[in-house]
């Protein structure tokens, strides 16, 4: 996917004149992003897109939708950080065991 987005003022004008057209454009861009992703990532992207659309449908207004999206991203970052910390802990434990074994063998 290599599409140049219209500038903000054009998008704002489309939103004011035809909000449904902007929504169709948004969905088109998302669909194109998923379809152009590597095959091994498409299923997870489809699931993510489904969760995003579900969350957007529950939002009271665009600001609420943005807040929901932000919370979803924050939760994802928190899970990634926890996984990273867990991996670092496991690696440091392995390094310590290797170092101890080397010291005992010396």
Image: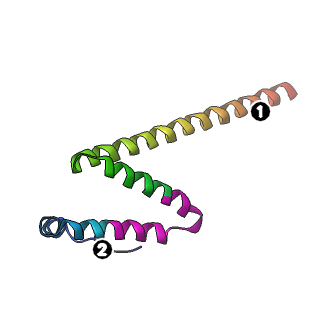
| Label 2 sits on residue | 4
Say left or right for 31 vs 12. Answer: right
Locate the N terminus by quadrant.
bottom left
Residue 88, by quadrant, is top right
The answer for how far apart the CA atoms under marks 1 and 2 are is: 52 Å
Tag 1: Cα neighbours inside 10 Å, few (<14), some, or many (≥20)?
A: few
Q: How many callouts does the rendering have?
A: 2
* Residue tagged 1: 98
Residue bounds of the magenta highlight: 27-46
Question: Viewer-nearest of labels 1 and 2?
Answer: 2
**Residue toward you, 7 or 104:** 7
Residue 76 in the image: state x and y as whole percent: 45, 43
Left or right: 90, with 99 as reference point: left
**In the rendered image of this protein, does residue 7 appear above or below residue 47?**
below
- The x, y position of residue 52, in whole percent, is 39, 53
Residue at 36% from the left image edge and 41% from the top image edge: 71
């Amino acid at each position: 996917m290599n599409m140049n987005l219209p500038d903000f003022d054009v998008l704002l004008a489309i939103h004011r004149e035809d909000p449904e057209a902007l929504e169709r454009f948004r969905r088109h861009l998302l669909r194109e992003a998923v379809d152009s992703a590597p095959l091994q990532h498409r299923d997870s992207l489809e699931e993510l897109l489904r969760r995003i659309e579900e969350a957007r449908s529950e939002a009271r207004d665009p600001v609420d939708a943005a807040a929901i999206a932000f919370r979803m991203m924050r939760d994802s970052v928190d899970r990634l950080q926890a996984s990273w910390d867990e991996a670092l802990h496991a690696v440091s434990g392995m390094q310590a065991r290797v170092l101890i074994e080397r010291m005992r063998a010396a």
